[in-house]
């Protein structure tokens, strides 16, 4: 039975991390004392759900969490410091602190260290999230004990709904672009002016022209999507924002 530790203090652990090529020890006191911290823990760096959904969700909502009084967002995994450092670079999630629980001490102290030897992973963390205030766990969302790797309750939306159900969530914005394209630069400028984060995929570099045509039926860039809806190019984006 997985443990819910709401109302208890987090385990006392020193994490061995890598920062700018150097070893840096970070204690749980440094992470949590006097702060409100959102933690989400997952089975492994570079794994599909963790990389495509779990981390990006928290990174995208970081400004909203901050407006709701959250000081830091921590991603924790039972991986070594080198793996976590490289994963942090790969994810580009600048609003999330990647903490390696290399020996599984913190996760074991949480009662959430599980055996994934059938996958060749050894001991790993069960997927969960929690809200920690001044070192005390206020709320935990632990994924159900089901086969595989369930991802139903530890997501950013669930945590944000707990902290502030009326919070306005940021839009999810994605665009096809080309390097050196002035219209793409215009679209990016409009998004930047409104502090809207976005993901850009570059035609000819990341994807082919055929992929652009298949996704949008267009051959010009930019092509901007907001919350899954195709807005179009820079002129259409300006009209969407009411820019003359």
Image (tube, rainbow, N blue to C red):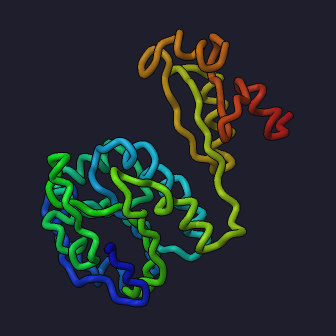
- Give coordinates of residue 59: x percent, y percent: 48, 55
Confirm whether residue 207 shows in the render: yes
Side (left or right) of 34 relative to 70: left
User: Which of the two residues, 163 or 191, is positioned nearer the viewer here?
Assistant: 163
Quadrant the N terminus occupies: bottom left
Side (left or right) of 80 relative to 42: left
User: Which of the two residues, 117 or 54, is positioned nearer the viewer here?
Assistant: 117
Q: Quadrant of residue 160?
A: bottom right
Image mark count: 0
The residue at 39%/79% (across/down) is 4
Residue 117's place in the image compared with 128, above or below, is above
Quadrant the C terminus occupies: top right
- Give coordinates of residue 47: x percent, y percent: 31, 44
User: Which of the two residues, 34 or 51, is positioned nearer the viewer here?
Assistant: 51
Residue 36's place in the image compared with 208, above or below, is below
The residue at 68%/49% (across/down) is 194
- Give coordinates of residue 136: x percent, y percent: 40, 87
Confirm whether residue 72 shows in the render: no
- Give coordinates of residue 171: x percent, y percent: 66, 48
Residue 116's place in the image compared with 226, above or below, is below
The residue at 77%/25% (across/down) is 235
Side (left or right) of 187 relative to 85: right
User: Which of the two residues, 125 or 95, is positioned nearer the viewer here?
Assistant: 125
Side (left or right) of 169 relative to 93: right
Q: Quadrant of residue 183?
A: top right
The residue at 73%/30% (across/down) is 231
């Amino acid at each position: 039975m997985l443990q819910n530790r709401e109302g208890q203090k987090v385990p006392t652990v020193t994490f061995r991390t890598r920062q700018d090529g150097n070893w840096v020890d970070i204690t749980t006191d440094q992470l949590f004392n006097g702060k409100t911290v959102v933690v989400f823990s997952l089975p492994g760096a570079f794994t599909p759900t963790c990389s495509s959904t779990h981390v990006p969700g928290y990174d995208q909502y970081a400004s909203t969490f901050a407006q709701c009084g959250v000081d830091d967002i921590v991603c924790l995994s039972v991986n070594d410091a080198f793996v976590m450092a490289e994963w942090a670079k790969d994810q580009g999630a600048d609003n999330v602190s990647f903490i390696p629980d290399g020996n599984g001490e913190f996760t074991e102290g949480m009662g959430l260290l599980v055996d994934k030897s059938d996958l060749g992973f050894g001991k790993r963390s069960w997927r969960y999230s929690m809200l920690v205030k001044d070192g005390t766990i206020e709320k935990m969302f632990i994924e159900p004990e089901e086969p595989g790797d369930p991802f139903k309750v530890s997501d950013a939306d669930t945590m944000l709904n707990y902290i502030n159900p009326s919070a306005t969530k940021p839009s999810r914005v994605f665009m096809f672009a080309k390097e050196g394209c002035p219209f793409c630069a215009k679209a990016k400028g409009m998004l930047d002016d409104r502090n809207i984060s976005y993901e850009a995929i570059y035609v000819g570099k990341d994807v082919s022209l055929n992929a652009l045509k298949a996704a949008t039926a267009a051959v010009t860039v930019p092509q901007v999507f907001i919350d899954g809806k195709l807005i179009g190019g820079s002129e259409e984006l300006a009209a969407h924002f009411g820019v003359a």
